[in-house]
Image: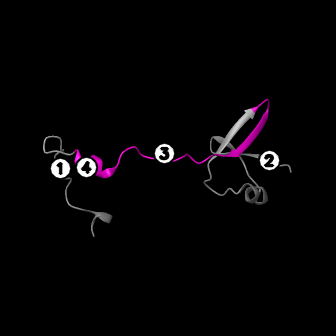
Amino acid sequence: MKNAVQKWGNSLGLRIPAAIAAEMRIKRGTPVTLQLDEGVLTVRVARAARRRKSRFKLNDLLDRITPENVQPTYNWGRDVGREIV
């Protein structure tokens, strides 16, 4: 299948036909990686970053708060927008 590179702002863009996007299971906003190897451009769906299991537990961290290390509160003014319940 042939396609044409088009200007997109200060860059160039290449449209991905719907059939190819469906086969690759990509949609608008899907992160991809681009690789150039000897003049061949390869587009791959970026692997999702693995979520590391935290080595901290919230209750353990809260237990470490003492009157000596607690930070003072700051008054930023009245609540506005979605802060108002």
Tell me the amino acid under the disc marked 4: Leu
The disc placed on residue 62 is 4
Element marked by disc 3: loop
Tell me the amino acid under the disc marked 1: Thr
Q: Earlier in the sequence, mark 1 or mark 4?
A: 4
In depth, the one of 62 and 21 nearer the eye is 62
Q: Nearer the viewer, mark 3 or mark 2?
A: 3
| Disc 2: which residue | 4
Can you give x and y, in whole percent of width and height, for residue 69 in the image? Answer: 17, 41
Placement of the C terminus among the 4 image quadrants: bottom left
Name the quadrant containing residue 35: top right
Residue at 23%, 48% in the rendered image: 63
Disc 1 versus disc 4: distance between alpha carbons?
17 Å
Disc 4 versus disc 2: distance between alpha carbons?
57 Å
Element marked by disc 2: loop
Q: Is residue 80 left or right of residue 50?
A: left
Magenta stretch bounds: 37-64
Q: Are marks 1 and 4 in contact (CB under 8 Å)?
A: no
In depth, the one of 42 and 80 nearer the eye is 42
Tell me the amino acid under the disc marked 2: Ala
